């Protein structure tokens, strides 16, 4: 019997806010929500953005942003800060804490020639270059020890500090005022790793089951962490700082090289959040990276190698150097091109909120930062522990594009992945269920090429499989393109659709572009209310640079619960439901704390370290201190027929 990988927890942070309890999804459909859900999400944003702080004694909110000691009621907070919370989330103009988009530092190369036969300047002797240029003559300065006069007799090539305007000024940023480093002792961690810590912590707490309780229920090596990022850590505390030090005349630190590795979003979770000694993996596939890791987790759970899997990514690419790289490819939506698209004058500011326009008239994608982690269990363990099931991940299909001319151009691989995903869902659930109760989370990168090629795939396959008015949404319209976690952003949004019934419309466009293929598709420009037409299946699609195509099949919790009741029996499922009530209560309690910006971030630096001398090893098992069950050393080989 093949084990079903079910989703029992999810969390993280993106431009839409906190993911757990569906808050990030709720931000994208905020105007379609019931009043209470809307208010709680807005209140949570205000708290995490440090506009207000909850006062435990009074049960009221301290007005932090106004610098006042005044206490506000919940309604007063909403009245005062709703618009600020809305404006400070989703895609927007890059904020100064990242860098000044109007004045980015760079070096300008300058040739300095002596006006006459020579020119002189003064310097500290210890600042002289080694070796001295041939055209330099150095002499001491009388009465000033350590100072020298330098005479140059030929052209001097110099680099002078300068400033320039960034052509791209929009990005998907974490909500204004929220800093992951505020929530644990960050110790000069690169930003992506700070985000990994807070994102994975949010996912763990979202389960409503203590992690120690999960660990005690399985063998240590039945837990796996599958996480990575595409761009490594390129800021000052990672590879970026390491590579810049020689040019800056500085020194590389002992942390910059190891913390820059793109495996660290997994390694940090093992070492500081979970304390896991189980399996670890870090697979990279450009924009499809999350789905590559999800496939590995699914394969291990269905094969019985793993019973618990933590899958995720953390990417922090909002750096001038990274944006220069994508901008040089013509991949990003520049202000100039946005103005042309909207018919604005050169002195008019474009609407950065609408920079990302999947399937509309568009000019490039909008880069973003995000951290998302999901927790999977096999179905039997989920029932045993009373885990709340938010859906199931049954398949991920990955295919390349074959021979290419341009490495970034699309190809046939995505036709294969998407067709396999649909066919597998039909094999499991029947054609009618897929035809009438499925939707697509498109890659939707907001480039002119993508809107044509991806829509053509969907439209052609819809015709093949008899699907009409197939709903298509694209979360990048709201949170931007976060590279490695892009499909994790899609998954978080999908779980929200299953919960609330609204498929987010592509609200950054007025209409679908004329060259988009949509004969059999429905690409809404406002939220699509499907509450009376249950969505049971979602296809997450990714078209990554280099031919990294992947499509995942995700099932709704309602459908999964029916499947589990059939597999395990009504009696066992009733017992599970009683346990699940306690789990949901614990998850709701965390949600209430997190809404007040009390995230309970897990960071166990040097805690619970294992003394290897205390390992108890026999020929058949190994007991590890701190773990209830031993590691099984009876490992049957599949190659005995060859011996």
Image (cartoon, rainbow, N blue to C red):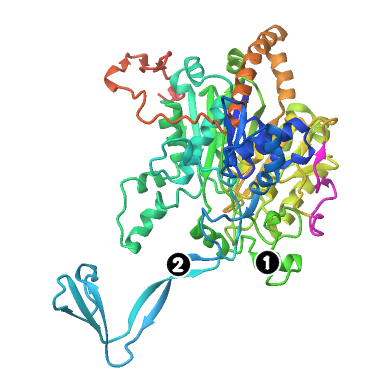
Determine whether 245 is above or below 632 in the image.
Answer: below
Residue 529, given in percent of the width and then of the height, sits at 83, 37
| Viewer-side label of 1, 2 | 2
Report the magenta residues as a range. 510-529
Per the rendering, the mark at residue 405 is none
Left or right, 626 with respect to 488, comes to left
Callout 1: few (<14), some (14-19), or many (20+) C-alpha neighbours within 10 Å?
A: some
* Mark 1 residue element: helix
- Furthest toward the front, the residue is 69
Callout 2: few (<14), some (14-19), or many (20+) C-alpha neighbours within 10 Å?
A: few
State the CA–CA distance, disc 1 to disc 2.
23 Å
Per the rendering, the mark at residue 106 is 2
Quadrant showing the C terminus: top left
Determine whether 516 is above or below 156 in the image.
Answer: above
Taking the spot 70% from the left edge, 23% from the top edge, the residue there is 560
On the question of residue 298 being in view, the answer is no
Residue where numbered disc 1 is placed: 337
Residue 118, given in percent of the width and then of the height, sits at 27, 89
Quadrant showing the N terminus: top right
On the question of residue 198 being in view, the answer is yes
């Amino acid at each position: 019997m093949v084990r079903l990988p079910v989703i029992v927890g999810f969390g993280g942070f993106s431009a839409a806010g906190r993911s757990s309890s569906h808050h990030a999804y709720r931000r994208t459909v905020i105007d379609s929500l019931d009043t209470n859900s809307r208010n709680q999400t807005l209140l949570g944003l205000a708290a995490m953005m440090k506009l207000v702080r909850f006062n435990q004694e009074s049960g009221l909110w301290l007005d932090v942003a106004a610098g006042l000691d005044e206490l506000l009621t919940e309604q007063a907070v909403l009245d005062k800060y709703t618009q600020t919370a809305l404006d400070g989330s989703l895609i927007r103009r890059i904020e100064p804490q990242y860098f000044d988009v109007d004045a980015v530092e760079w070096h300008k190369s300058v040739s300095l020639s002596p006006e006459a036969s020579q020119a002189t300047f003064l310097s500290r002797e210890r600042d002289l270059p080694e070796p001295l240029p041939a055209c330099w003559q150095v002499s001491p300065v009388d009465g000033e020890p350590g100072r020298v006069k330098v005479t140059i007799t030929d052209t001097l090539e110099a680099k002078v500090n300068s400033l320039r305007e960034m052509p791209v000024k929009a990005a998907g940023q974490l909500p204004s005022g929220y800093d992951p480093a505020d929530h644990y002792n960050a110790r000069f961690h690169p930003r992506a790793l700070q985000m990994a810590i807070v994102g994975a912590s949010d996912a763990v707490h979202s389960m409503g089951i203590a992690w120690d309780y999960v660990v005690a229920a399985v063998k240590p090596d039945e837990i796996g962490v599958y996480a990575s990022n595409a761009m490594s850590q390129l800021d000052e505390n990672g590879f970026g700082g390491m590579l810049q030090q020689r040019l800056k005349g500085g020194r590389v630190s002992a942390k910059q090289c190891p913390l820059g590795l793109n495996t660290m979003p997994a390694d940090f979770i093992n070492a500081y959040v979970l304390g896991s000694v189980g399996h670890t993996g870090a697979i990279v596939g450009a924009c499809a990276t999350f789905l590559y890791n999800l496939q590995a987790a699914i394969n291990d759970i269905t094969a019985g190698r793993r019973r618990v899997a933590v899958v995720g990514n953390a990417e922090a690419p909002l750096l001038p150097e990274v944006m220069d790289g994508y901008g040089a490819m013509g991949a990003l939506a520049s202000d100039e091109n946005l103005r042309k698209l909207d018919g604005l004058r050169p002195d008019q500011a474009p609407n950065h909120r609408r920079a990302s326009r999947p399937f509309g008239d568009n000019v490039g994608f909008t880069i973003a930062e995000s951290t998302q982690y999901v927790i999977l269990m096999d179905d039997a363990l989920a029932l045993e522990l009373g885990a709340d099931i938010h859906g199931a991940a049954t398949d991920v299909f990955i295919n390349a594009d074959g021979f290419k001319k341009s490495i970034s151009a699309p190809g046939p691989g995505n036709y294969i992945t998407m067709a396999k995903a649909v066919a597998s869902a039909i094999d499991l659930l029947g054609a009618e269920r897929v035809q009438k109760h499925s939707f697509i989370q498109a890659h939707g990168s907001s480039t002119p090429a993508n809107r044509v090629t991806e829509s053509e795939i969907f439209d052609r396959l819809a015709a093949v499989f008899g699907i009409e008015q197939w709903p298509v949404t694209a979360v990048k319209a709201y949170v931007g393109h976060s590279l490695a976690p892009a499909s994790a952003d899609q998954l978080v949004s999908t779980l929200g659709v299953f919960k609330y019934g609204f498929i987010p419309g592509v609200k950054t466009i007025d209409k679908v572009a004329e060259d988009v293929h949509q004969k059999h598709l429905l690409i809404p420009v406002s939220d699509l209310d499907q509450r009376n037409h249950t969505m049971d299946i979602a296809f997450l699609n990714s078209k990554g640079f280099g031919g990294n195509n992947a499509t995942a099949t995700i099932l709704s919790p309602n459908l999964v619960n029916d499947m589990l009741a059939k597999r395990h029996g009504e009696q066992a499922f009733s017992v599970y439901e009683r346990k699940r009530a306690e789990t949901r209560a614990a998850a709701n309690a965390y949600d209430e704390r997190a809404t007040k910006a009390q995230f309970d971030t897990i960071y166990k630096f040097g805690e619970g370290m294992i003394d290897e001398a205390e390992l108890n090893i026999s020929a058949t098992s190994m007991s590890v201190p701190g773990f209830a069950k031993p590691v099984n050393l009876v490992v049957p080989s599949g190659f005995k027929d060859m011996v």
